[in-house]
Amino acid sequence: MFVREISIRIKREVEQMSFQIVTTIVFTLSMAFFVLLLGMFINDQFKKIVIYEDFYFPHQLTTLSSPIYNLSVVSTHLVCNSSSNSSSNKSMDLKDFLSPKDLWHAMNDDELMWRASMVSQVKQYPFNRTPKVAFLFLTRGRLPLAPLWEMFFKRNEGLFSIYLHTSPEFNFEPPPSSVFYKRRIPSQTVQWGRASMIDAERRLLANALLDISNERFILLSETCIPLFNFTTIYNFLTKSNQSFLGLFDDPRKIGRGRYNKRMHPIITISDWRKGSQWFEVHRKLALKIISDVTYYPVFKNYCTPPCYMDEHYLPTLVNKVCPKLTSNWSVTWADWSAGGSHPTTFLRKDVTEEFLDSVRYGFNCSYNGELSSICFLFGRKFHPSTLQPLLRIGPKLLGFG
């Protein structure tokens, strides 16, 4: 009996001890969990206080002595102050946004087109804007007729901009005194008749659109010459209420015969147009050209030789989106009378006063609704050998020099 009582007592004590152990463990775990929650709460509140002070009391940050705090928050504060001091020493004004000082950039074509297509919704300019004519030279390399162009641009600073698209491997830079100095844009290889030709034209337009003062845009080659002085050309273009881009419906094999039925329904045969590659457009139309993401992919996929994009893409695009914005003729003259896929190339012996006058005043056209004897402002294709006679005739005939 005695042994049994002892056994029962021992069993009871063991059960009580087990209960105490379990209770102690549960209590310890509960306290640990509470301490953890309290730590998380304190940490969260501390972060809120730090962020609050960082936003609203930045001048007080330097008084805090915590090394960790100094490394994270104070360094940010110092960077902000450094930026502020830097901007005060080299502040950006409106001109930095209106006209890029350096034409060279790292944007790809998609980024460039996106950037150039931005248009201000405020119609009134917050500065005295003088419209400029952008001269877009699509060349392989050097400009053999550059001295003539230098003479043409002389004493007209502030009224024009120049952009050069050359072969990527071409890296010649004219002297700083030249109007062509540092006017090359990031360029890519161009193949005649291929999509790369249109890419180059759009690239030139997009780079020129980055200058908000550029109002008119004329595409030229290294074989082009001006037929009048700068003032005459500037006034003719800036006072025109239309662009100058030819587009006509050519029923022949070299016109409608190049249409690809796979372009349907985005582009139909009735939309199809042909025209000269050498365009002149105003800013509104230039924006539409570089913003096109509907018709360009269709042309790129289905207009390949014997379909030539440089003869059909822009005429068809303009006919689709804004046919009334163009006068339907080009201001760049070329002689196609000999036939073939390229116009006549003029040599030294061909350049005379009589010949140039026949191009300058030998035609009639409609300009702003009125008859005009000045229709062509530029001529092509002029061989490098024509430079000397052009320089000799220029001051007298063209009125510049």
Image (cartoon, grey):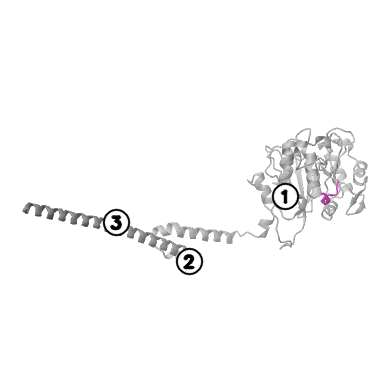
Which of 107 and 295 lies nearest the eye of the viewer? 295
Residue type at mark 3: give it: Leu
Apparent side of residue 290 relative to residue 226 in the rendered image (left or right): left
Q: Are marks 1 and 3 in contact (CB under 8 Å)?
A: no
The residue that disc 3 covers is 29
Residue 59's mark? 2
Q: Is residue 328 above or below residue 87?
A: above
Residue 147 found in image quarter: top right
First to last magenta residue range: 323-328
Q: Earlier in the sequence, mark 3 or mark 2?
A: 3
Q: Are marks 3 and 2 in contact (CB under 8 Å)?
A: no
Q: Earlier in the sequence, mark 1 or mark 3?
A: 3
User: CA gap, disc 1 to disc 3?
Assistant: 71 Å
Residue type at mark 2: give it: His
Which of 325 and 375 lies nearest the eye of the viewer? 325
Please give the name of the residue rendered at 42% of the width and 65% of the height, measured from the top-left corner: 63
- For label 2, the crowd category at 10 Å Cα-Cα, with few meaning under 14, some 14 to 19 and many 20 or more, is few
Residue 73 position in % (x across, y down):
45, 59
Provide the secondary structure element on which disc 3 rests: helix
Apparent side of residue 368 relative to residue 96 in the rendered image (left or right): right
Q: Earlier in the sequence, mark 2 or mark 1?
A: 2
Q: Is residue 27 above or below residue 197?
A: below
Question: Does residue 247 belong to the magenta stretch?
Answer: no
Question: Does residue 326 belong to the magenta stretch?
Answer: yes
Which of 352 and 249 lies nearest the eye of the viewer? 249
User: CA gap, disc 3 to disc 2?
Assistant: 44 Å
Q: Nearer the viewer, mark 3 or mark 2?
A: 3
The residue that disc 1 covers is 208
